Amino acid sequence: MTEEVAELLQRWIAAADNVALAFAHESALKVDAELAQMRKNLIDEFCALFPKAAPETLASGVDSIVAEIQKRRREIEAAGEMPPALN
């Protein structure tokens, strides 16, 4: 793995943590709706960025991101962490 790819992966993991924290303690219906829309948007973006890639492959990658967000959300809620207050 190149240094650039490793850095990109770390940025994605950090972004997933931030999204999960924002969704912590929200209703499951709201989170599911938001993640479904985010999933669609990400797949559309990745298909535009990588037109030669199989859409199923890109969707699989996005599904991994969404699963990580859900996993981190459950961990955050179990630990009692709260999202930062909006000013």
Image (cartoon, helix red, strand yellow):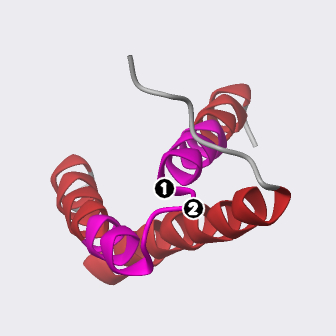
Residue with the mark numbered 2: 69
Instruction: Give above or below for 80 relative to 55.
Output: above
Residue 29: percent from left, percent from top: 34, 80
In the displayed structure image, the side of residue 36 where residue 15 appears, left or right = right
Q: Quadrant of the C terminus?
A: top left
The one nearer the camera, 34 or 2, is 34
Residue with the mark numbered 1: 23
Q: In terms of secondary structure, where does tag 1 sit?
A: helix
**Toward which corner of the image does residue 18 lie, by quadrant?**
top right
Name which residue lies at 60% across and 33% down: 11
In the displayed structure image, the side of residue 49 where residue 63 appears, left or right = right
Instruction: Give above or below for 44 relative to 71.
Output: above
The CA distance from mark 1 to mark 2 is 9 Å
Q: Residue 34 colored magenta?
A: yes
Task: Name the amino acid type tagged 1.
Answer: Phe
Name which residue lies at 56% across and 71% down: 64
**Toward which corner of the image does residue 7 lie, by quadrant?**
top right
Q: Which residues are magenta?
A: 12-36
Residue at the right extreme, as displayed:
79
**Toward which corner of the image does residue 73 lie, by quadrant?**
bottom right
Cβ atoms under marks 1 and 2 closer than 8 Å:
yes
Residue 39: percent from left, percent from top: 31, 67
Residue 59: percent from left, percent from top: 36, 75
Name which residue lies at 15% across and 53% down: 48
The overriding secondary structure of the stretch rendered in magenta is helix
Instruction: Give above or below for 60 relative to 51.
Output: below
